Amino acid sequence: MGVFRLDPMMVKLIITVMLASFLPARGGFVPFFEGLTTAAIALLFFMHGAKLSREKIIAGSSHWRLHLWIMFSTFVLFPALGLLVIWWHPVDVGREIYTGFLYLCILPATVQSSIAFTSLAGGNVAAAVCSASASSLLGVFISPLLVGLLMDIHQHGGAMNGLEQIGKIMLQLLLPFVLGHISRRWIGGWVERHRSLIGQTDQTSILLVVYTAFSEAVVNGIWHRVGVSTLLWILAGSLLLLLVVLAINLTASRLFGFSRADEITILFCGSKKSLANGVPMANILFPAATIGIIVLPLMIFHQVQLMVCSFIAQRYKKQGQKAQEQRSELSADARQMESQESS
């Protein structure tokens, strides 16, 4: 039953949203939290760059067919499904919710959880490190371009032009990322020794962005537009979206003849979306009044993907252990037969 527990980060997000709902930042506190959020985002991407190991990426970079499919799943398949949801719009939940679904579909994959689930299930960890890291890096460029390409900026209230978007992304996300990666030669050892501290920095940065975004959203009446029925629909939509992508990736990996280890890597790297990248990026790409409601689908999808992928990883692990036990039994039987024949 541990699979169905709330992720600790999700619990913190819920508490942060509740805090913003009852005690939103107002007046003079708004520019303070906005400045603090900008600094936290810069620190977050600086640490992402410092954690990126070129050696691990090179070690898993040769498997181009696998990486090509994962990138296709992340930046083509997912956005296509997001456009399909907007075209279909089965439930009247408001424009911003559908924008949020499309936004989560254009984000890069997670890094830590994709690698962790791949490792747990017995997949190709080197390829997972390469693919997830490349997805995170490419997402800094591709996701903002897809926002401009796929979203009707005027319809959804986005007043920012493409060049301004790219400039802000370069300054607030890419520059700290590059500086962090350059600094890895001096701080890489410290980063490796203090991974738990870096993880806490990541979480704190995300929580700051969420608090600032939801404070603005609460002031603009988010809870008058989003009720329990809307939240349940987002939950059901997130689950359906994830299951469709998993089914397509599983079918494709077997159709194209990938090994079991590569199949696992495709499932976990090609079906995840990054909360760590998505929340800070939304802070730059969308007007402050709409960020809170737009990131709601991403926050719920984050929990759904962890629960479902944890269940799948455990299944793969048990299957692998069972296969290993069978091989061990066959090997023992073969040795016993050889011993009897020799005697």
Image (cartoon, rainbow, N blue to C red):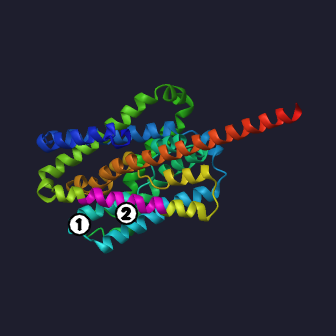
Which image quadrant: the C terminus? top right
- Nearest the viewer among 181 and 99 is 99
**Residue at the limit of the structure toward the bottom, as seen here:** 87
Residue beneath disc 2: 147
Badge 1 marks a residue whose secondary structure is helix
Residue picked out by circle 1: 95
Q: Say whether residue 225 is magenta.
A: no
Foreground of the two, 122 or 210? 122
Q: Nearer the viewer, residue 69 or 192?
A: 69
Seen from this angle, which residue lies furthest right?
342
Task: Tell me the tag on residue 66.
Answer: none
Identify the residue shown where x is 14% and y is 50%.
218
Residue 156 is situated, as x and y percent measured from the top left of the image, at: 25, 66
Residue 329: x percent and y percent? 68, 38
Q: How many marks?
A: 2
Q: Give the residue type that dot 2 points to.
A: Val
> Amino acid type of disc 1?
Arg
Whether residue 58 can be seen here = yes
Q: Quadrant of residue 33?
A: top left
N-terminal label among 1 and 2: 1
Q: Which residues are magenta?
A: 233-247
